[in-house]
Amino acid sequence: MSTSPVCSIVIRAFNEEDHIGRLLTGIMEQSLDDVEIIVVDSGSTDATVPIASRFPTRILTIPPHEFTFGRSLNVGCSAARGEFLVFASAHVYPLYPDWLVKLIAPFNDPAIGLVYGKQQGDGTTHYSEHQQFKRMFPEASTIPQRHPLCNNANAAIRRSLWEQRPFDESLSGLEDLDWATWLLEQDRSLAYQAEAVVVHVHNETPRQVFRRYEREAIALARIRREEKFGFGSFLRLYFSNVISDSKQALREGCFIREFWSILWFRWMQFLGTYMGFRHSGPVTDEVIQAFYYPNRKSVTNHSSGRATKPIDYTSAIQRNMSTNLDEDHE
């Protein structure tokens, strides 16, 4: 391994035995194979590490009590050798074999320091989470992007820029927003690449949804200290999103099936946000619009009409299992 790969893929993992094998299989199916894969595990007690060990990965570990999202990324980035650092949540998987090619393509513009790709749900995704994905990750790319909203469950940055400014390890979340804010302050820009698609598996309990949004709100209140999210914002955004989701569900003919899910998901989302902001104080109109407000019109994810065929995971997983069995017998 005397030459550096084009990109290093850093995967944060904790008890992801149900998902990490699919992600790693999808990486092995990519048309860009000049990559290294680094898994940063923070104390998994299930089969996450044994599954990851069956793939060409480097596995790094950190004690659970030392985990933050920023620290986990920094540990992986410190070990990486690629020109570009690609970040993937352990519970996402690429939809197409050109995911990596599409994700790093905007770096042809030297002014771009961060690229993030499209995310969509699957059959286990809660209805309101589907609406979140549709709003935050539209069909059209934005290159360049002049605001810092992004998501590093599917993203890439230049390693040279990370060396200048690692991720903030003290934040409870939104380390990507914090880093992108710094990037824009350096007169660089972001890019949203809609063709770099992953499926993000979020089958969370109500308590997990609450904790996720509380954690992010605590971080957002630190990053944007002038912002606030009061009880009035909580009620207004809860009811406006429930109404928006319900109207969309009626149009799609699934209102009765999804209504309870809409009620509890939006309640936990905005209650978590409200409780998180009670730790500190003001959210600008731009951030509130992007993170919280419902769509003003119906949004539907349409087929991209791309010539590239999606990855056939059934066949890919079978091939990988056969390869592993052959290697085990050698």
Image (spheres, grey):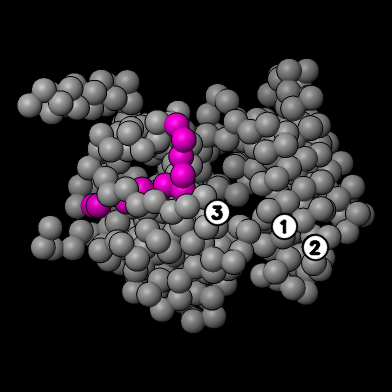
Read off the residue under disc 3. Answer: 65
Q: Which residue range is magenta in the image?
A: 35-46
Q: Are marks 1 and 2 in contact (CB under 8 Å)?
A: yes
**Residue located at (34% from left, 45% from top):** 99
Three-letter amino acid code at disc 1?
A: Ala
Which numbered disc, 2 or 3, marks the residue that appears first in the sequence? 3
Q: Residue furthest bottom?
A: 186
Q: Position of residue 85 (x, y in %)?
A: 35, 60
Query: Which class describes the residues within 10 Å of circle 1: few (<14), some (14-19), or many (20+)?
Result: many
Res 52 → quadrant: top left
Q: CA distance from mark 1 to mark 3?
A: 21 Å
Mark 2, secondary structure of its residue:
loop
Read off the residue under disc 1. Answer: 217
Q: Position of residue 242 (x, y in %)?
A: 81, 36
Q: Is residue 254 magenta?
A: no
Query: Which class describes the residues within 10 Å of circle 3: few (<14), some (14-19), or many (20+)?
Result: few
Three-letter amino acid code at disc 3?
A: His
Q: Are marks 2 and 3 in contact (CB under 8 Å)?
A: no
Q: Is residue 88 left or right of residue 4?
A: right
Read off the residue under disc 2. Answer: 279
Q: CA distance from mark 1 to mark 2?
A: 9 Å
Foreground label between 1 and 3: 3
In which quadrant of the rendered image does the N terminus lie? bottom left
Q: Is residue 225 left or right of residue 84?
A: right
Asked if one can make out residue 42 in the rendered structure from this viewpoint, the answer is: yes
Q: Is residue 41 magenta?
A: yes
